[in-house]
Amino acid sequence: MNQVTTEGAIRRIAVLGNHMPRQCGIATFTTDLSNAIASEFSDLDCFVLAMNDSGTHHVYPSRVRFEVTEKDIAAYRRAADFLNVNTVDVVSVQHEYGIFGGKAGSHVLALLRELRMPIVTTLHTILGEPNLLQRQAMDELCELSERLVVMSAHGAALLREIHGVPEHKIDLIPHGIPSVPFESGSKDKLGVEGKSVILTLGLLSPDKGIEHVIDALPEILARCPDTVYIVLGATHPHVKERHGETYRLMLENRAKSLGVDSSMIFHNRFVSPDELAEFLSAADIYITPYLQPDQITSGTLAYAVGSGRAVISTPYLYARELLAEGRGILVPWRDPQAIAREVIGLLCNDAKRFALRERAAAHGRDMLWPAVARRYVQSFEQARAEHDDRRRTSFQAKTLAKRPAGLPEINLEHLRLMTDDTGVLQHALFSIPHYAEGYCLDDNARAVLLMALVEDDGLEDFKAVRALASRYLAFVSHAFNEKTGRFRNFLSYSRRWTEKCGSEDSHGRALWALGAVVGRSSDPGRQSLGGDLFHAALPAISNFTSPRAWAYALLGIDEYLRAFEGDSNVQTVHKVLAERLLDLFRRSSGDDWPWFEDRVTYCNARLSQALIVSGSWLDNEEMTAAGMRSLEWLASIQRSKDSYFAPIGSNGFYKRGEPIALFDQQPVEACGMVSACLDAYRMTEDKRWSEHARRAFNWFLGQNNLQQSLYDASTGGCRDGLHPDRTNENQGAESTLSFLLALLEMRSADRPDVAKPGSLELRS
């Protein structure tokens, strides 16, 4: 047992990751690593912060001292406080995008930004072609981490080439493995005595490729009839939640149809480390027929090589590296004949199989958990020695400068009150729903958009969000008339449509909301329905004449293309609408009137925003410049003499050559200005735009002509507007949704997975 005795050495280590009894590879790794450190270093206090799935609870051992629910952003900040208060010396992060909340797992960054101690991050996944959100999240994670641990040389190369991480910051430490006797054993205990055993272990999912081994079995059994293939592992919990046991049942049916089911054993369970050692000891050949070429680590493959098994694998990155120099055999992707050939070659040649095993076992000596734990502690000590408080403080200051301070918490209570089994009602008398006015598509589309952002941000209870999101989307679906390809807008409280066809603006706003569902929702049902409706409703937009309908549709297309950038049909509509809006600006604007029409009316900033995001997608500098110019002008004319945001009043608007109507000022205008200015800020990194956004948002909180708050903190609602002498005390759906949309965008403005209507991220 080792002791850390150097002066100023670490005394307390916190490991952040999944932990057993949660069933996944990260949980096994975190458990084994923390146990190994505790066993090897008697004077180190090593404990765990365990990540939990939403809605699940595990009974953890005493080493787990704090639990974080993956979708609860507040829990991450509480965890940061817990670590800082408990004077932890080093935090070891087990990073995999999927175990943390937020797009690209970005919620964990909220925790790491607040820490005062060095961070050492083990990267279990490094993508060769990350999308924009994944790259931004990884870039910040690398910046926040003092050191980065990878398990393969290829992973280190990806960090250097894609994320610009200097080589001196990277530690290559192999995946740890338990000690497994080299000599074969346990066959009698497992009921396969006298058999040649082929083994695949790990959580089941369709990318495992096990079906190709099953397809090879008839040829294998023809030459080696006393062979049995064991598939050991439960279906991955996330796969099971979404698809049930479809993959396992397919494998079992495939074995039966090929007549090899009597030579197969499925163990549908998550095994303990001791059981895993028994199965590995019994295996003559271990196979990983995986189908993901970019996979840079595999705990099960590491176990097999380290225990001296004869290994056959497909050539994914980690396998190519670990099985090099004769430590295993690689076979082509999806090639049962090659699998059969190599299996037969090993089973029929004991000398060849034994030589393969010896080379693997020799390589595996440095992979045993005691050796790996010592390497990790060396990395922790180096991180502690190199830790530069001024660099971390500087980075946090830069990040926090972008984060709005003093924002209200998200409160959906008034929105819930305004919602019944049909959808969200349009209007309220004070804070009481006004049934007589019924419902409209416009507000339910806004609510769909809001739920996509709330779900994206992870700020609310998942079940509550799912229920509301489904209800609002159901309303939008009901509003669509398949015969006409158009949406209806107004529905009476008696559930009767009051028109055959709604406005062009309501149609465009519905497309916007549906695009956000496709681009942001993690619910496959909502995504599928949203996609179907989006495609069904998109053709009608080409015949519209309303510039705002074009703008809303463009913002929806922007959201849709986040998920399906290669959809050529949508890209065609995108280009046509964007060019149409740009042409309108060309024809109407002048040196003193850089605007789309002869009047500035309602939802004005959305016109500029649509050109900004579309210009980015289409790489059209003129389009982006027109959007920026018009938005700059709009910001200048919507500013009071006291420098407050003062949106164009709805009682007359602003006609070229005439005075600006000062009232009534509407929440929807402030919301649009917040969104458009944050887009402009992302595009230019010009802080003036973030200041414009903050000024527009503060209008809700009382920084306006009357110095009266539109937001009602006691209800969670927003008043309907600002009159010359008072606020409109009614708290209808449009105003409340406008406030909540603006609030979410302001809260998420510093995050790489910016949750917003219309794309705020800076595209490369």
Image (tube, rainbow, N blue to C red):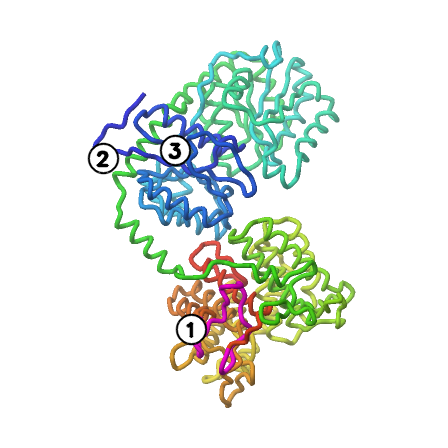
The crowd level at tag 2 (other Cα within 10 Å; few <14, some 14-19, many 20+) is few
What residue would you read off at disc 3? 47
Q: At 38% from the left edge and 60% from the top edge, which residue is drawn?
A: 402
Please say if 678 is above or below 283: below
- CA separation in Å, label 2 and label 3: 20 Å
Q: Report the front residue among 254 and 247.
A: 247
Q: Report the front residue among 589 and 699.
A: 699
Q: Which residue type carries mark 1?
A: Gln
Q: Position of residue 644 (x, y in %)?
A: 41, 76
Contact? badges 2 and 1 (CB < 8 Å): no
Q: Which numbered marker is on residue 703?
A: 1
Q: At 72% from the left edge and 63% from the top edge, which residue is drawn?
A: 480
Q: Report the front residue among 171 and 705.
A: 705
Give the mark nearest the N terminus, 3 or 1. 3
Determine whether, in the image, residue 694 is placed left or right of residue 315. left
Q: At 47% from the left edge and 68% from the top edge, which residue is drawn?
A: 674
Q: Which residue type carries mark 2?
A: Gly
Q: Which residues are magenta?
A: 702-726
Q: Position of residue 753 (x, y in %)?
A: 48, 54
Q: Which numbered marker is on residue 8?
A: 2
Q: Position of residue 210 (x, y in %)?
A: 62, 29
- CA separation in Å, label 2 and label 1: 51 Å
- CA separation in Å, label 3 and label 1: 47 Å
Q: Secondary structure at mark 3?
A: strand
Residue 604 in sight:
yes
Please say if 752 is above or below 635: above
Tell me the chief SS of the magenta region: loop
Give the mark nearest the N terminus, 2 or 1. 2
Q: At 37% from the left edge and 33% from the top edge, which residue is drawn?
A: 172
